[in-house]
Amino acid sequence: MKSRLILPLFALISLLVFTDILHAQIDREAGESFATRSEVIGHRGMVATSQPLATQVGLDILRQGGNAIDAAIAANAAIGLMEPTGNGIGGDLFAIIWHAESEQLYAINASGRSPRNLSYDELMEILDDKGEESIPAYDLLSVSVPGAVDGWFEMHDRFGSVPMSTILAEPIYYAEEGFPVSEAISMYWQRSAGFLSEQPGAFEETFTIDGRGPEKGEMFRNPDLGNTFRLLAEQGRDAFYRGEIAEKIDEWMIENEGYLRFEDFEQHTSEWVDPVTVNYRGYDIYQIGGNNQGTAVLQMLNILEGYDLSEKGFGSAEVLHLMTEAKKLAYEDRAKHYADSDFYDQPTDHLLSKVYAEDRRELIGDRAMNDVTTGVDVMEDGDTIYLTTADNRGNMVSLIQSNFRGMGTGFVVPGTGFSFQNRGELFSLDPNHPNVYEPGKRPFHTIIPGFAMKDGRPWFSFGNMGGAYQPVGHVSIITNVIDFGMNIQEAGDAFRWMHNGSTEPTEVGDASLDDGGTLNVESGIDYDVVRELRRRGHTVRIGESFFGRYQGIMYDHEKGVYYGASESRFDGQAAGY
């Protein structure tokens, strides 16, 4: 009898020990591993987006013989329908593309411009009459030309491999037949519907069910957007910029005393640009410069390269202190020197030089800096989507697209199915600022796609949404992988931080950081680290911030496989085959 009890007792003890070990490994807040789940691995293709159905739409295009560029467009169209709280064809787009056949990296700036017939003086008179000191977020003054559709067709004309009718078929189906709304998106949708329904136009009939946002799992249809997609599939980009859609917008703007006109759409163009880059510990990190904040990622990495982060340890007080100080320095340059390159000769070479980084690094001491200004003489929130795709030919796409503030302005031209963005809010009104409002000018953008190369070969396509958080998120992902040896899912799941309070590119005069700002951290941080950061002079808050959403695809050239990762805090999914 005694011998019969030994084995079950031993098995029970073993199970309890194994369970303890398992919990220690998967507790991302306290354990050694930060991943909530494994990376997704595939060798024929990979898609990672913030909405699982949109991921499947992109993957289906790959299965039909489309390439990564086709899949990115399809997924973006689907997310514009399924996650209108972050993006849509009323907004702008930026993308970085690795084209395997030509073995080159390409970047496109598909952001729109301000009304060409609204002068600075006229704008200031209108604002004065409204009693406003800045461009209001939910006003027709904040609407710039939507650039996303032109970006799709530019990408497709240059690299696409299947017809746009094929690419848009599934988004059209979901728009007309409906789709179940996912959990996090439902929460944001209901919040936006509560106040945007009062906007002039067709917001309520387009984006609500009986005047409210859809609940989790509730089926939602947007047949007007489906019809717009059909027009694009049949008539191309001119349907949007020179045809029926542009004409509807022009008529509605005139009726509602808006400022965009048919000519603004007719004259719109995207721009293929050379991405900006720095080398970080042997890896070439790429961003899109000009009127977006990607340059800040590279400035921060240049500063941080002077420290042995891996020796100091992930999540240590020293590393968080150094990263926060590097962010403060880069963001003051961001506030003064990031603007439309057609109107301002940004000192990019100087900002990204290792010498300048060394000069800025010398300003960092053991205690938090309170007063920080730009070193060159011359928005905290925002909802967006980021997606990335890869195919069996070796092409990779890093794409980001946004309405800016959630569902944008809430202005919906009847019959079109989309809301206009409010990017124009991000112009400065200081006549001496590089980002000052001017007719036909692209405003400052927060949205940035990221890409990394190793030894001249594509390595990592990555990004995260989240307004001003995005450069911090990029730097966190890159250092988590390169310095701290995390896989790409761990890198996104590890606890996050954000410093708030830096000067914005919309501010006027000689504004600069003068109170040190606030360091916000997720709850996974060790509280001893919080105490040490406070001892160093940082104002630290746990939570109380938005820490973005992340997707990434890494290519392993030796194994010939893709690794995919997606945001575990919200609705995201990476899938391969």
Image (cartoon, helix red, strand yellow):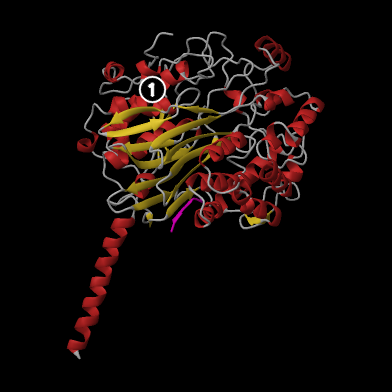
Quarter of the image containing the C terminus? Answer: bottom left
Going by the picture, which residue comes out furthest to the front? 101
Going by the picture, which residue comes out furthest to the left? 3
According to the picture, the residue beneath numbered tag 1 turns out to be 330
Residue 523 vs residue 456, the one in the foreground: 456
Residue 570 vs residue 18, the one in the foreground: 570
- Give the x, y percent position of residue 548: 47, 39
Residue 541 in view in this figure: no
Going by the picture, which residue comes out furthest to the bottom? 1
Quarter of the image containing the N terminus? Answer: bottom left
Please determine whether, in this image, residue 102 is positioned above or below residue 42. Answer: above
Q: Is residue 509 left or right of residue 321?
A: right
Q: Is residue 25 left or right of residue 311?
A: right
Query: Is disc 1 surrounded by few (<14), some (14 to 19) or many (20+) residues within 10 Å?
Result: many
Q: Is residue 571 magenta?
A: yes
- Give the x, y percent position of residue 405: 59, 34
